[in-house]
Image (spheres, rainbow, N blue to C red):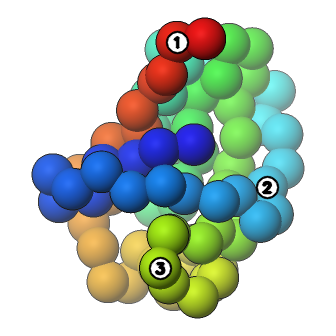
Amino acid sequence: CWVEIREEKKRLLIKKARLEPSFSGQPGEHLNPSSLVVACQRGALRLEEIQIEGKKAMGVTDFLKGISHTQIKFILKST
């Protein structure tokens, strides 16, 4: 998927995630400020391990230590 971090577009590889069927929102919406839970068409994904292009893979907890959740925007691409 693509994300915008501090207004810079980056590719994000999701290495580990789990489904969260009880969450809902608009697809791409960041639903939880203390973690990375992203709304899908049905339910949501809780991202647990990610890799930003050009960086090492890391757990979301470590990633969020260096960035505010308000600086992350998930970009939807139409197919």
Q: Nearer the viewer, mark 1 or mark 2?
A: 1
Q: In which quadrant of the rendered view does residue 69 lie?
A: bottom left
| Residue type of the residue flagged with mark 2 | Ala
* Residue 33 shows in the view: no
**Please, what secondary structure does the residue beneath circle 3 have?**
loop
- Rendering coords of residue 30 (x, y %): 44, 38
Q: Distance between the residues labelled 1 and 3?
A: 24 Å
The residues tagged by marks 3 and 2 sit, at their Cα atoms, a distance apart of 20 Å
> For mark 3, what is the residue?
54
Q: Element at badge 1?
A: loop
Residue positioned 69% across, 50% down in the render: 46
Q: Which residue is drawn at 75% across and 14% down?
A: 42
Residue 36 location (% of width, % of height): 54, 54
Residue placed most toward the observer, 47 or 13? 13
Name the residue beneath numbered marker 2.
17
Question: Residue 20: x percent and y percent?
Answer: 78, 37
Circles 1 and 3, Cβ within 8 Å, touching? The answer is no
Location of residue 52 with respect to 46 vertically, above or below = below
Mark 1 or mark 3, earlier in chain: 3
What residue is disc 1 on?
78
Residue at 32% across / 83% down in the picture? 66
**Crowd band around label 1 with a 10 angstrom C-alpha radius: few (<14), some (14–19), many (20+):** few
Q: Which of marks 1 and 2 is nearer the N terminus?
A: 2
Is disc 3 in contact with disc 2, using a CB cutoff of under 8 Å? no
The amino acid pointed to by label 1 is Ser
Q: What element carries label 2?
A: strand
Please give left or right for residue 33 compared with residue 37 in the image: left
> Which is more foreground, mark 3 or mark 2?
3
